[in-house]
Image (cartoon, rainbow, N blue to C red):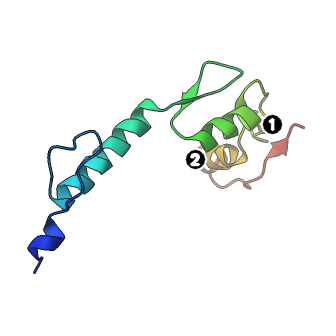
Amino acid sequence: MISVSELWDNEPIEGDRSRMLPRRLRQLHKAMENTIDTQVRRYQCPKCEKSFSQSYSMYRHYRYECDSLPRYQCPYCGHVSKWSHSIYNHIRKLHPGQDVTLNKLY
């Protein structure tokens, strides 16, 4: 059972000092603020116009994808990709029964 003192928190929400809300509502309010902040915050690639919600995604794009040529090639049909796992999946799907290998272009 939850006691009344656990349910209510005497600290007001930031910016709203006149009202006091239950602790669970404050937690929900904070979670909603965090969700809104992550939807607005974007990390833009310095080389191109792409933007990402996560900084590590932008860094990966900047380092491995942006302005780079594909590095891997399918040995059976010449399909190319910047990611080795993409070639492995391509071979498993389009060339069943073949050895799952790839050609590294550089």
Of all residues, the one furthest to the bottom in this rendering is 1
Which of pointers 1 and 2 indicates the residue nearer the eye?
1
Q: Amino acid at mark 1?
A: Arg
For mark 1, does the 10 Å Cα neighbourhood hold few (<14), some (14 to 19), or many (20 or more) residues? some
Left or right of 64? Residue 52 is left
Q: Depth check: 88 or 64 in front?
A: 64
Closest to the observer, 87 or 60: 60
Rendering quarter of residue 72: top right
Q: Measuring 65% from the left and 44% from the top, which residue is drawn there?
A: 86
The answer to whether 38 appears left or right of 89 in the picture is left
Which residue position is annotated with label 1? Answer: 71
Residue at the outermost right position: 106
- Residue for point 16% across, 43% down: 18
Q: Is residue 75 visible?
A: yes
Q: Secondary structure at mark 1?
A: loop
Above-or-below relation of 40 to 97: above
Sequence-wise first label, 1 or 2: 1
Percent position of residue 90, x then y:
63, 43
Residue type pointed to by label 2: Lys
- Please provide percent x and percent y for residue 80: 73, 33
Q: Quadrant of residue 37?
A: top left
Label 2 CA crowd tier, 10 Å (few <14, some 14–19, many 20+) = few
Pick the front one: 104 or 31: 31
The circle on residue 51 is none
Q: From the viewer's perspective, is residue 2 above or below residue 86?
A: below
Q: Which residue appears at 85% of the width and 42% of the height?
A: 104
Of residues 73 and 77, the one drawn nearer to the viewer in this rendering: 73
Tell me residue 65's x, y (percent): 71, 32
